[in-house]
Amino acid sequence: MTRPVRISTTDRFNPMIVLTDLVDGAKRVHLWLAFASDEIQNRYRRSKLGLAWIVLSYLIFVATISIFFGTFSDLDHNRFTIYVAINFAIFTFLLGNITDGCAVFRVARTWISSVPLPHSTHIYKSIARSLFVFTINMIVAMTIFFLYGYKLELVAWEAIPAFLLLLVDAVFVQMILGYITARFRDIEHLIQSITRILFFTTPVLWVRDEHVSRGMRSTVSELNPMTHALEIFSAPILGRHADPHSWMFILYMSVALFVIALVVGGYSHRRLPYWL
Amino acid sequence: MNKSDAPGTSPNASGLPAIPEGDDIFLRAENIGVKFEVSGNVREQGLSEHDPRLIWNRRHQLRGVKALSDISFDLKKGDRLAIIGRNGSGKTTLLQTLAGIISPSEGRLISRGNITSLININIGIQAEATGHRNITLRGLAAGYSRKEIEEKRQGIAEFSELGDFLNMPMDSYSAGMRMRLTFAIATAFSPEILILDEWLSAGDVAFKKRATDRMQEFVSQAGILILASHSHKLIMDNCATGIWLDGGRIRAAGPVADVLKAYEESMT
């Protein structure tokens, strides 16, 4: 049996290394699950309520919004609460991946500069952590549905492929942002100010269908990828087919993200340890 | 003594020698160079003497640092190499390159066999987690299964002599305790190529003795040891050949006693 020879040499630009890294990282599932569970435990260590804070902070937000903003919408109160519950859960997950992506390699710098792990290990860890929070939020959302007497319809299964696609996109987004912010620290601040705007330009607090008339708000929200990401996931759960236009938007965006990840990763992979 | 005396260096450095067949572990550096890119606004301040490692552009702005140039050597199983040199001579950069943490900007590094590296004592641990948890994490990071880790846990605990401290978070450990644990973990999984930085000299006499014993046991199992250190004794006890790095280049290479003597004479 001849064991493989490892050759490490100069790669000025090598997009293939991104694919190798993604596959190698995925194989280390025990490692990134262990890291993710450690981080979740650390975050809530020494707090009395611990993990219950995930449920609480979600409930506080949904309750507040449905009481204060419910009157601005044409939907009745129950329907609006359900609408906010599902949209806020997926919105937090997606937004969390953007903000975590900015720091994904920075917070792992001690590991990156001491153990030659695939870079994607750190990305998977980060996503696993936000997936855990998302799962809890979805369980609470389903409980709210039940209490309000809302039943899922058959069309709800369409949310599953939508979520899987968004999960894959999260990997690319974190990779792109992780490398770019490692090199250009200013980008992280820029992203932070953009995410604040995303909260208002995405139909989480307001209902997209009520603002179809041409206007500033509708134009901005149509250009906002988050609007379409929410549409393909939430619409089936709320009992209707998602807008095909939104599916196309997200599909094109996924391809674009994949290509950008290859280019950015192909250039940055070798240089990351120098930048941190 | 000059560079062509480097152990195992092929006489025709221009033609690349063939990759060894079979299953034997080896590690070969072929004209490795490492350049750090700098993108700040450091300007040349009319210095009369330049450090040749700094790379300036035409507008006298600092563009990069050539940390290593033209490093070549060839190690086979059983080889024990010491890396000697002053602070800032490129020792740690070379070790990081050999460990696969940073990739060379010039040349090639070819190896066969598991590489375990202990380059900085403080890195690669989860400080909030317990010692036992870190044994698991380091083991997983090194690519071992949970079963293999559990098999080694007892041995690691004994070698580290930490006892019940293994149930405490690592940020409550002293530097010496951390070092004992990381060394115990790294050497527990019988690595084939072991790369150690000088931090080992932080241990007390008793630990150094046991560490040396363990390294010798490891090398007798036909591994490769690469050790960077300032400690004369540690080097003489553990290494057979040496490389003297000066300004990112190999200044001398050969039997460790000769290299160390030349290095120490240059200091006085």
Image (cartoon, coloured by chain):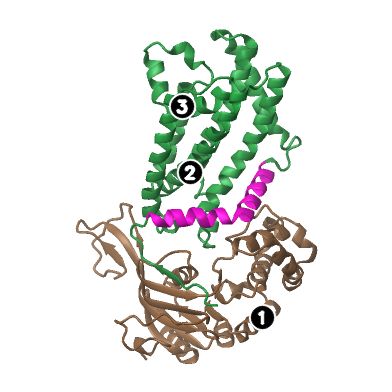
Viewport quadrant of the N terminus of chain A: bottom right
Q: Disc number at residue A174?
A: 2
SS under mark 2 = helix
Is disc 3 surrounded by few (<14), some (14 to 19) or many (20+) residues within 10 Å? many
Q: Earlier in the sequence, mark 2 or mark 3?
A: 2
What chain is tagged by disc 3?
A
Q: Is residue A190 left or right of residue A230?
A: left
Rounded to the nearest whole Å, what is the CA distance between mark 2 and mark 3?
Answer: 19 Å
Q: Looking at this view, is B176 or B118 the one in front?
A: B118
**Kind of residue indicated by mark 2:** Gln
**Kind of residue indicated by mark 1:** Arg
| Magenta highlight on residue A19 | yes
Please name which of the two marks, 1 or 2, marks the residue nearer to the observer: 2
Highlighted magenta segment, given as a residue range: A15-43
Residue under the image location 46 percent in, 46 percent down: A175
Residue ID for mark 3: A228
Image position of B241 with respect to B128: above or below: below
Q: Main secondary structure of the magenta part?
A: helix
Is disc 2 surrounded by few (<14), some (14 to 19) or many (20+) residues within 10 Å? many
| Chain rendered brown | B
**Residue B245: horizontal and vertical position, in percent?**
41, 78
**Residue A122: horizontal and vertical position, in percent?**
54, 51
Q: Disc number at residue B214?
A: 1
**Kind of residue indicated by mark 3:** His
What chain is tagged by disc 2?
A
Rounded to the nearest whole Å, what is the CA distance between mark 1 and mark 2?
Answer: 42 Å
| Residue B63 at least partly seen | yes
Rounded to the nearest whole Å, what is the CA distance between mark 3 and mark 1?
Answer: 60 Å
Q: Most extreme residue toward the left, as rendered? A: B58
